[in-house]
Image (cartoon, grey):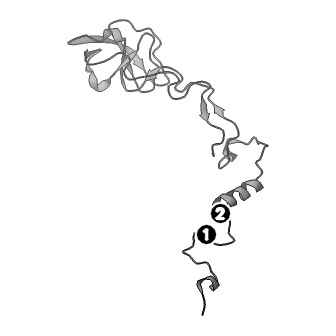
Amino acid sequence: MKTQDSIRHTSCCADDAEPGLLSVEQAERHIFALIQPLHCPERVDTRHALGRTLADDIRSTINVPPHINSAMDGYAILATDIPTGGTTQLTLAGTALAGTPFTRSVNTGQCVRIMTGAKLPDGCDTVIMQEQAEVEDDRIRIDAQHRAGENVRQAGEDLSLGQTAIPAGKKL
């Protein structure tokens, strides 16, 4: 008759570990001991960099956006022209388009029609959304529900000069 001690143990799927196999930690140590990191970065054209790993940080050489600009289609104004109550009228002095800035100075009581991404004219610091202005001929009417600096994007707001655009180690 066989006793419990005399029964030879065979492994089965219920065992915690298969005898003779490495643990995960042991396997990782063994694999990492065999890996030799490359220490010879290469320069390749951007079109050939797909799937490669970046060796050095890529830093921005410009501000993005490059200048203070409008975040909305609307009217560039001086914040001091926002009424404290009721409404006020401003005279249209011109238009600023993305790529075609308004080059004259804007004075108190004036506004400039501005498109999204257009450089903010000198003197202006606020953009009133077109939907929030009543337009009649060459004048707009705005109310007191606005705040200084609204709808304006600062130069370098997305990415500033010298900031890391893509960090080293990133797979492209």
Callout 1 amino acid: Ala
- Would residue 5 appear left or right of 148 to someone viewing this image? right
Quarter of the picture containing the C terminus is top right
Quarter-wise, where is residue 19 in the image? bottom right
Helix, strand or loop at label 2? It is loop
Q: Which residue appears at 76% of the width and 54% of the height?
A: 33
- Kind of residue indicated by mark 2: Ser
| Mark 2 Cα shell of 10 Å, populated few (<14), some (14-19), many (≥20) | few
Residue 25 image position (x, y, % from top left)? 65, 58
Query: N-terminal of the two: label 1 or label 2?
Result: 1
Rendering coords of residue 81 (x, y %): 31, 9
Say whether residue 64 is left or right of residue 40: left
Near-viewer residue (112 or 66): 66
Q: Who is closer to the viewer here, 140 or 52? A: 52
Q: Residue at x 59, y 33 (%)?
A: 165
- Label placed on residue 52: none
Counting from the top left corner in percent of width and height, residue 78 is at 37, 11
Q: Quadrant of the N terminus?
A: bottom right
Between residue 32 and residue 15, name the one nearer to us. 15
The quarter holding residue 46 reads: top right
Query: Given contact means CB atoms under 8 Å apart, are the residues at marks 1 and 2 in contact?
Result: yes
In the image, residue 57 above or below residue 129? below
Provide residue 96's location: percent of width, then percent of height: 43, 20
Q: Is residue 98 left or right of residue 90?
A: right
Which residue appears at 47% of the width and 21% of the height?
A: 154
Q: Residue furthest right?
A: 40
Label 1 CA crowd tier, 10 Å (few <14, some 14–19, many 20+): few
Question: At numbered mark 1, what does the secondary structure look like: helix, strand or loop?
Answer: loop
**Mark 1 sits on what residue?**
17
Q: Which residue is mark 2?
A: 23
